[in-house]
């Protein structure tokens, strides 16, 4: 590639001399001038593309070298020592948010991207300070696209499948996507592609230009990496999102776990969807899953995760020997409580945050294999008796002191905590300094916590907290 760049540069310099002579002689028209001028521009473009490619290749070399040093040991708990997480640093997809599409794209307000970067970067920096390795989706996706033509074309197939375009428009979009570089495609699938000449260029896309909105939808929720996949031990579960605005997120995760060499080396994909009865529509999102260790999974039956998915996942995990217990917690179907981790998050061994006001409404079931049917659900009371269901231990539960403060804390995602280690957590700051959940965790008389408070600026607009913004690739059992 370097030789190719040097060759083009030599030819371009010869053409540059010719063009300069023509201009000096006043010969700015005619076939010779037009031909050399066009060739000069063509070589310039090719050199630029090759230089970008060389830069991408060097980035991927550096990335592979750094990732090869990592040990990805799988996820063995929700609150053991956190070793490595996958995050997504938000980018131009956030700029796609406008008042008219907020509801469709599942945001409550438009974040300021500068604030988003400041808050997100500080979060990642704190994790690194605690010796947690932070990997970014965009880096891994770009490396996967560059390293695997199969992954490149499978991603295009998935993007096309997830559109509702006509067959003719789908074919036009496919041709356009196939002409993109691997790095461009990795950006397009996250940032989106609008139906404009500025973004589609002069390619033969008249059909697409007549459409409104986006031919590839932006993914502003991509920063909530928790939702599109889960890892239980070394098994990877790719989720099925409840809303179409997010359907390309699990597509991206399926590609990188299938083709990125470091992930292929350490993880195994589980096909849980084969257990979904036709024509049922199963939906499941990662904010509802909490692997508490010792073969036990807590899973929310919520607005985003339904019973079809829970049954199918339980069957897949029982048959693979990955799990021996699945405990279901019913969560009222409401956007404020969209996932289990918005009202209950793991802090340590038999320790959780809990929005206690909802506890009487949160029924608990145990799912077990059944010979006569796929699974059997057994009622186990409510969350108030979850300790006995988990093995008879008394639970440590953290909440705000008063109901009204707990409601405010829950709305602001402060129950949604990320455990770096047992009783060392990250959550959003703010709230009632005397009665809020952060203060209760820090000053609990029996078992206090280290709490790092993250700014909500640029993050809370998407209704997700610290737990949502990360997904563990390597976490130890609780010691």
Image (cartoon, rainbow, N blue to C red):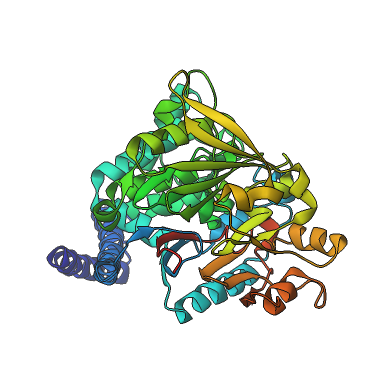
Question: Residue 346: image x %, image y %?
Answer: 58, 60
Q: Quadrant of residue 331?
A: top right
Question: In the picture, which quadrant includes the N terminus?
Answer: bottom left
Position of residue 316 in the picture relative to residue 244 (left or right): left
Q: Quadrant of residue 104?
A: top right
Question: Residue 161: image x %, image y %?
Answer: 44, 31
- Asked if residue 371 is positioned above or below residue 174 in the image, the reply reads above
Position of residue 458 in the picture relative to residue 312 (left or right): right
| Residue located at (25% from left, 62% from top) | 50
Q: Quadrant of residue 317?
A: top left
Position of residue 374 in the picture relative to residue 155 (left or right): right
- Asked if residue 364 is positioned above or below residue 426 in the image, the reply reads above
Look at the image and tell me whether residue 38 can be seen. no
- Asked if residue 118 is positioned above or below residue 102 in the image, the reply reads below
Look at the image and tell me whether residue 445 can be seen. yes
Question: Residue 316: image x %, image y %?
Answer: 39, 34
Tally of marks: 0
Of residues 395 and 334, which is closer to you in this image? 395
Question: In the picture, which quadrant includes the C terminus?
Answer: bottom left
Q: Residue furthest front?
A: 392
Q: Residue furthest bottom?
A: 129
| Residue located at (37% from left, 53% from top) | 233
Question: Residue 353: image x %, image y %?
Answer: 66, 61
Of residues 322 and 176, which is closer to you in this image? 322
Of residues 476 and 199, which is closer to you in this image? 476
| Residue located at (62% from left, 67% from top) | 116
């Amino acid at each position: 590639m370097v030789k190719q760049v040097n060759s083009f540069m030599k030819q371009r310099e010869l053409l540059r001399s010719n063009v300069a002579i023509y201009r000096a002689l006043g010969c700015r028209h005619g076939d010779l001038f037009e031909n050399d001028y066009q060739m000069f521009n063509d070589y310039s473009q090719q050199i630029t593309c090759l230089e970008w490619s060389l830069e991408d290749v060097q980035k991927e070399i550096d990335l592979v070298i750094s990732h090869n040093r990592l040990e990805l040991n799988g996820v063995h708990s929700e609150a053991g020592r956190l070793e490595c997480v996958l995050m997504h640093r938000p980018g131009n997809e956030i700029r796609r948010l406008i008042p008219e599409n907020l509801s469709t794209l599942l945001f409550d307000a438009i974040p300021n991207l500068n604030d988003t970067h400041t808050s997100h970067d500080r979060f990642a920096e704190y994790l690194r300070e605690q010796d947690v390795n932070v990997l970014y989706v965009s880096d891994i996706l770009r490396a996967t696209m560059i390293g695997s033509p199969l992954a490149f074309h499978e991603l295009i197939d998935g993007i096309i499948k997830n559109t509702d375009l006509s067959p003719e428009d789908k074919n036009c979009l496919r041709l356009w996507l196939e002409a993109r570089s691997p790095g461009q495609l990795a950006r397009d699938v996250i940032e989106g592609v609008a139906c404009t000449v500025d973004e589609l260029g002069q390619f033969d896309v008249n059909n697409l230009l007549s459409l409104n909105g986006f031919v590839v939808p932006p993914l502003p929720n991509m920063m909530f990496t928790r939702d599109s996949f889960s890892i239980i031990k070394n098994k990877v579960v790719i989720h099925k999102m409840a809303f179409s605005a997010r359907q390309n997120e699990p597509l991206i995760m399926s590609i990188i776990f299938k083709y990125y060499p470091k992930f292929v080396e350490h993880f195994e994909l589980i096909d849980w969807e084969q257990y979904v009865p036709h024509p049922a529509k199963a939906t499941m999102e990662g904010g509802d899953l909490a692997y508490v260790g010792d073969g036990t999974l807590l899973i929310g039956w919520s607005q985003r995760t339904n019973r079809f998915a829970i049954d199918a996942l339980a069957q897949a995990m029982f048959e693979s020997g990955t799990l021996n217990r699945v405990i279901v917690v019913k969560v009222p179907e409401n956007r404020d409580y969209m996932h289990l981790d918005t009202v209950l998050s793991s802090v340590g061994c038999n320790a959780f945050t809990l929005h206690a006001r909802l506890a009487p409404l949160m029924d608990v079931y145990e799912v077990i294999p059944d010979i006569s049917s796929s699974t059997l659900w057994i009622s186990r009371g409510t969350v108030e008796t979850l300790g006995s269901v988990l093995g008879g231990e008394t639970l440590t539960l953290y909440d705000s002191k008063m109901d009204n403060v707990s409601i405010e804390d829950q709305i602001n995602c402060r129950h949604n905590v990320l455990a770096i280690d047992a009783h060392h957590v990250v959550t959003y700051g703010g709230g009632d300094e005397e009665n809020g959940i952060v203060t209760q965790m820090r000053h609990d008389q029996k078992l206090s916590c280290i709490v790092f408070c993250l700014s909500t600026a640029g993050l809370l607009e998407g209704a997700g907290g610290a737990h949502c913004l990360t997904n563990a690739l390597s976490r130890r059992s609780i010691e």
